Image (cartoon, grey):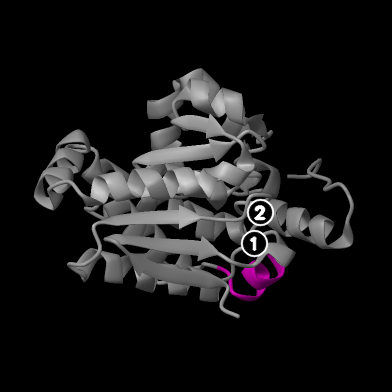
Amino acid sequence: MSEILTHVDAGVMTLTLNRVDKKNSLTAAMYAAMALAIHEASTNDEVRVLVIQGHETIFSAGNDIADFLNNPPATEDAPVFHFLRGISTLAKPVIAAVAGPAVGIGTTMLFHCDLVYAGDNAAFAMPFVNLGLVPEAGASLLAPKLMGYQRAAEVLLLGEPFKVEAAMEMGLVNRIVPPSEVNALAQQQARKLATKPLSSLIETKRLMRLGQASQVSKQMTEEASVFGRMLTEHAAREAFTAFMEKRKPDFSKV
């Protein structure tokens, strides 16, 4: 069965992360599939809204570490960056339905969604520093803008999880519902949007993001460059080795 399910109905394209047995951890192949689907959403006139959803117990644990180490995103041509450029530039509305943990890119992709609905079991984390890396997806720009600098510094520098109530207070989440209702709510809201004039939706989104698009693109390019460099340094190697060996990393010499 495909690890990324794609379905189009009533003007809504739904991307479902379908690797629940692996906590919806994302592989290069999954990023490539999502990037392709987003391109189709952009060019297909029958698609008016994009929904990204997971399972009621898990949104995404972030990158699949084994696949990540075997297929490191060393250049901007890596599938993950194709996905991020696609979701960050999609002109049509994007809705996320998040239940359970959303780790790493499971959180940072939400900065590019227009509406985010979350289960009361949702928890968010951006533990890039803990892996000897830096944020991606423009999060180093967008998190301070959305949350304020001090809150963004706390979640990015400490890399500790934060609960859904905090995410809603920060402005990352629109509404909290029981986990079993999250995907249905996202679909309901998507169908509302799909009945509205597409040109008005696109132009309204463009105007709200006017002036930010070039900043985000520039920030993502800088992040990717630093991310690629730090991926080869000792701190990241120690972090990933410790993860695979199921021990606490030792950063005393970095």
Residue 195 position in % (x across, y down):
20, 49
Residue 158 visible in the shown view? no
Residue 38 position in % (x across, y down):
34, 65
Task: Quadrant for the C terminus, please.
Answer: top right
Q: Which residue is mark 1?
A: 25
Amino acid type indicated by mark 1: Ser
Measured Cα–Cα span from mark 1 to mark 2: 5 Å
Residue 50 location, quadrant: bottom left
Look at the numbered disc 2 and give the secondary structure of its residue: loop
Whether the magenta-drawn stretch holds residue 65 is answered as: yes
Asked if the residues shown at circle 1 and circle 2 are in contact, with their CB atoms under 8 angstroms apart, the answer is yes
Q: Residue at x 66, y 44 (%)?
A: 100
Taking the image as shown, residue 73 lies to the left or right of residue 40, namely right
Say if 41 sits above or below 252 in the image: below
224 or 194: nearer the eye?
194
Taking the image as shown, residue 224 lies to the left or right of residue 13, namely right
Say if 57 sits above or below 240 in the image: above
Tell me where the magenta segment starts and ends, as one range. 64-72
Query: Which mark, residue 61?
Result: 2
